[in-house]
Amino acid sequence: MTAALPRRRALLIGCGSYTDAALADLRSPRRDVGELRRVLREAGYSEVPSHIDCTTQQAKLAMETFLQQARVDDALNMVYFSCHGLRDRQGRLHFAFSDTEQGYPGATAVAAEWVRDQISASRSKSTVVLVDCCFSGGFIAGMQARSGGEADVDVLVQGAPEGSGVAVLTASGERDASFEDTGSAVIRLSYFTEAVVAGIGTGAADMNRDGRITVDELYEYVYHHVVKGPSPQRPRKLRMGEGSLVVAETTLVPAPAVQAAEPVRRAASPAPGAEGTTVPPPDTATPTSPLSRRRVLGGAAGAAVIGCATVLLRRWGDDPPSDRKDGSTAGPASDAGTADPPSTVLAGHTEQAWGVTFNHNGTMLASSGGDSAVRLWTPAGDKVGALYGHTGAVWGLAFNKADTILASSAGDRTIKLWDTDTHQPLGDLKGHQDWVETIAFSPREDTLASGSYDGTVRLWESGATTARATLTGHDSPVLGVAFNPAGNLLASAGKDGRIRVWKTATGRSARVISGHDGAVWGVAFSPDGTVLASCGEDRKVRLWSVATGKALAVFKGHTDIAVKVAYRRVGDWLASSSDDSTVRIWETASGRLVGVLTGHTASVRGVAFHPEGNLLATASADTTIRVWNLGGFPGR
């Protein structure tokens, strides 16, 4: 007789119907749950309780019951969600169920932190969590934040037996959407769950063909199928524990192609207007993808819930001219070159690349990403080294004026300082209460400014471990900071739609600038310090007089959020990066569009000019860094 295998169990919870009109109904969760249940039962799971369109209380009871009934000898316990994801004012993830009120996620939704607590209290030695909702990467970020700087995540399960621990696969990043197809007459699975079902159900996720599908193989399969399809989302993974978690044993059959379809964001409300072995990509058409934007939705009692909003925008055949307040007209897009300049692709990050910056003498390029790493390169693209120490996605980067220190900021709420010669850590700066989105060194002295999702800007002096000043005034996360060339002013960009200019000597507010429609994501001073450039959720790049705060110009053309801006040292060009996967270069004097860089295949999150102005570095959600040679670029 064959000995009975330890049992595998799964709890599947989906919600597509909501009583709150602010939460749009979803088509796919019911089918997601049904199809995943089918393939898991076929894979030998002994228990697959499923719940659809349940209330928050029913969902919590189902989860607590399921996890309390886990046994230490279970081969695996799986928990799966397919629903709306909401983020509260602090950026924490919540799962929405049928009676959830969008404005009150803390009281009416299931907090991801509560789910993590139930998993921690469970007797299950092997747990896999699959999360298919907007902002689902927040589940991972919360686990990483728990370890903070106190312990490496693997230490949390040190001593556990081989093939044990917790693994989390999410449909998207912590600030990104998850999508379903609403354009088809037939209700389809969501893109993430469709890949999970195909990988397990056909056995195609058994990448090494050993008859077992590990969680790492499943992630690899899902990741490549999702990124090769029409949806812009990028799955994420966190693995804590020892050995390989086996999701299923399988008999291999050929994997079906995953059909492409028009992706529609799994929105919290409708709004108007890895590296590794590559698996065969799905057969895809080239769809016209909906373009997304982030939006802050106000709650009933002033509680803010960050939801997903769908925006269907036409793709510009011709870019509209920029609006200039001085009465001049920017040149049309047809003046810009149509061919990309040559670029070098730097591959090394295993998740989305977020930040990029050159040092002041132009000999080193630093990049950061969702893989918690800071990577160092030569401008030619040669690898110099990698810096590890953060336990969350690394977003901000800055070199001090002497190029002896590199600072990095991350989702673990810390800023780390690194010796640029030895690549060794010099210390941590702690004090922010939420992830640190952005940092900048003063060009005149070693004062470091940081902006955080806790809504504050902090100023740090060289050698100090506590902030010299905490600047308050923004009503929501701070997404960008920049010093003027003299170092006496600091600009901060807020998700509240405002730009604040501060006097660095006193920490007092010098000016508040409003004009963007929605969050402001990036700011940069012109090299002469007279103009402040900004960009944001309204897809526009705006120029402001530093002396008066008055608007000088508006550059239009991006078809999704404009994320960051950077001036060339001589001040003649301004580059803007965007979630529309492009970088646009503008002539600052006339507003003429010099050119559009189109080589990236996903959002471009970071942009930086080389000090000599002949190179431009970009960081993208497609995981790559590109260094563009602008020597012969049109308009140079």
Image (spheres, rainbow, N blue to C red):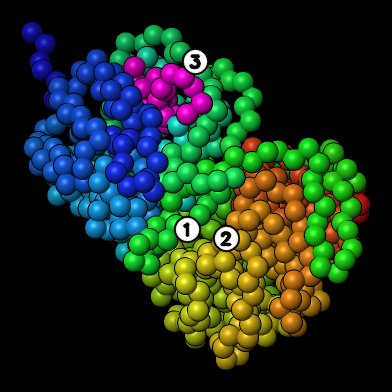
> Viewed as shown, does residue 629 lie left or right of 173?
right
**Looking at the image, which residue is at 38% across and 34% down?**
26
Task: Give amino acid for label 2.
Answer: Gly
- Density class for disc 3 (Cα within 10 Å; few <14, some 14-19, many ≥20) is some
- Quadrant in which the C terminus is drawn: bottom right
Given contact means CB atoms under 8 Å apart, are the residues at marks 3 and 2 in contact?
Answer: no
**Looking at the image, which residue is at 46% across and 47% down?**
308
- Density class for disc 1 (Cα within 10 Å; few <14, some 14-19, many ≥20) is some
| Mark 1 to mark 2 CA distance (whole Å) | 8 Å
The residue wearing badge 3 is 257
The residue wearing badge 2 is 518
Given contact means CB atoms under 8 Å apart, are the residues at marks 1 and 2 in contact?
Answer: yes
Query: Magenta segment: does it hold 190?
Result: yes
**Image position of 472 with respect to 214: above or below:** below
Q: Position of residue 516 (x, y in %)?
A: 63, 64
> Mark 3 or 2 closer to N-term?
3
**Looking at the image, which residue is at 8% across and 37% down?**
69
The residue wearing badge 1 is 296
Report the mark closest to the observer, 3 or 1: 1
Q: Position of residue 506 (x, y in %)?
A: 57, 91
Q: Which residues are magenta?
A: 182-201
Viewer-side residue, 437 vs 343: 437
> Mark 3 or 1 closer to N-term?
3
